[in-house]
Each structure stands twice: as structure tokens, then as C-alpha cells.
Amino acid sequence: MLNRTRPVRTLVGSAFLLLVLAQVEGCYYMQAIRGHTELMSRRRPVAEVIEDASVPDDIRDRLALVAEARNFAVSELLLPDNDSYRTYADLERDFVVWNVFAAPEFSLTAKTWCYPIAGCVAYRGYFSEAAARKLGDRLRADGYDVAIGGVSAYSTLGRFADPVLNTMMRWSDLELVSTLFHELAHQKLYIKGDSAFNESFASAVAEIGLSRWLAARNATGERASHLARRELRKRLFAEVSKTRDQLTEIYESVVGDDEKRTRKREILDALSTKAETILSRSGAASGNWLASPLNNARLVSLNLYEGRLDAFRAVLADCDESISCFYTEAESLAELAAVDRNRRLDELTASP
């Protein structure tokens, strides 16, 4: 995405890049170009929208919050000081893209798609829900478990000036601020081909950022609620981790496929039931995001965003809560070969 102040030659160069990509995979890249171009054409500077009396008050108030959080991201979290999230775009729909996740019927290894800039990632994004569901149907026909979900935030890893979107305005203030920190973290550090590292790192930065944001605002009540929700989410992901281990054991066993399918369904349904019990006892107002029917693809999508979160929490603790040290250590992990990086992340996850 491009900022309105950038020179025309940058626009031309970026357009050329997208056209080259379009030759790589035809229809997929053409829909990406159309969707991206339409999104960019709707941008307005956040400051301008805030001053526009014709814009609903709630949107102007949320954008004022975004502007404050954007500055906090630079000054306190040392995230990139660029033109990303300094404009606003109203797409007049609920989601910006729809992501497709897939995994084999008896495996928790995500299917990946590879791109020239982002590398190989464990999802396929479409600006059209119909196109996403069409791919999902094809993958199911090939025997994959599939999960499709609408996505409210959009990032180009800093290649363009990513805007704040109307699709993000439906969230709570904390979700909005957290997502801003998450997306900017991708611009701070990103490894081509390691979706789990990238998403968990960004989730860790969002968690750190939100905690410090609330502390800086003396939002004692909100901070307590945030910590309670975080602990609840940790409990749920502990159950997800147990389920992954159980499924892996079944998938690697020598029993027949029919037995594997039966045990798989029982294990996944048990996770849904356990999650519902935990949420009910906690008094959580939100719904059960582990509700049945679960499948391998849904577990894969969850693991991407938080599968390595405990490892990054350990890194922060080892750094005595220093954000600059945290980034240095994360960058050191990123420089390791994939097998060594995963081994070290496993060690960090297991550390007290």
C-alpha cells in the first residue's frame, strides 16, 4: 500500500511489481490486484476523517484512539514510524479478505502457499468470499480439512502504507489497539516461510503492547479484565495443546482410517465440550471459539497465532521486560536455521 505523499515513481514501480506477480499465478494475483487497488483508492488521512463532521462520532472517536495508539507504538514499543495506519478506508463490507486454511485429514501440518514477497504461508487470502469458498470446496474434494474465516485487518508487511479499515471498527477498543500493535510487529520482524514464528511473535508484541498501553493510561479496571482474559485464553490453549498431542498420536498410529476418523471426532468434540465448560465457569461473555465442528485446519489456524507465544513470553522474561532486548533476541532466533530455531523455541516454551 502506498502513502499519498510518496513519489509517482514508487507507484509505478509497485504497480509493475504487482503486474509481474499476476503473470505467476494468473487469476489469483489479478483478484489481489483488484482488491488491493480498490482498498487503496478509499484511503483518507486519519486526521482529516477525525475533523470531518459528517463522519459518525463513534468512528471519529475510535480513530482518535488509533492515532494515540499509533504514536504509542513508536515511542514506547519501538515499532516502525512510517505511514502505515495513518489513513482510514471504509470498504462498506464486514471483512477485508477471507483466509483459507487447510490440512490433511490425518495431519496437523498446514498446507502452504508460496509468494514472492511473503514467502510460504499457511493460508490463502481472497478479497472475495465466494472465491475463498470455491477454493475450500476444491480442497475438501482433494481430502483436506478446511477452515475459512473472514479477516478484518490487512497488512502488506510495510511495503505499502496500510490503512485502518472500517472492518476493524466493530472490535472493542482493546482489540483495536492490540491489532494495530500486532500488524506493526510484522513490519518489525518477519521471516519468509515461517508463519508460526511470525504470527506468534506479532501476538507477543501485541500482548506486551496492550499491557503497557493500559498501564500508561492507568486503566486499572481494564488491565485487570485484560489479564483475566489472557489467563482464560492460556487455559484454553493448554487444552488445544493436549488435543494436538492426542491427535498426533492417533494419526501416527497403525490403526485403520475408519478408526482414526472415529477417534479424531471424539477427541475434537471433547475439546469443544471442555472449552464450553471452562468458558461457562469463567463467566466469559464471548462465545466458544472452539465450538464443534472442529477439524485439523481450525487447529492449524489457532496454532499459528499462539503456538509459540509461551516461548516469546520466556524471551521477554529473560530480558527483564526490556522491549529492545526482546527484539534483539527475537532477531537472533530469526537468524537461526529453521530446525535450530524450532528447537530453541521448544526449549523456551518448556522453560519455567
Image: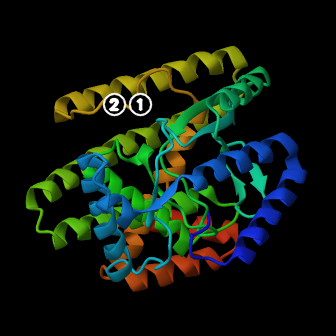
* Sooner in the amino-acid sequence: mark 1 or mark 2: 2
Amino acid residing under circle 2 = Ala
Q: Residue at x 61, y 61 (%)?
A: 156
Q: Nearer the viewer, mark 1 or mark 2?
A: 1
- Report x, y in % for residue 249: 59, 36
Q: Residues within 10 Å of mark 1 (few under 14, many from 20)?
A: many
Q: Are marks 1 and 2 in contact (CB under 8 Å)?
A: yes
Residue 252 versus residue 269 in the image, above or below = below
Left of 297 or right of it: where is 66?
A: left
**Front one among 296 and 2:** 2
Circle 2 sits in a helix, a strand or a loop, which is it?
helix
**Front one among 159 and 113:** 159
- Report x, y in % for residue 48: 37, 64
Residue at the disc numbered 2: 275
Visible residue check, residue 116? no
- Image quarter (top left, top right, bottom left or bottom right) of the N terminus: bottom right
Residue at the disc numbered 1: 290
Residue 253 versus residue 36 in the image, above or below = above
- Report x, y in % for residue 116: 79, 62
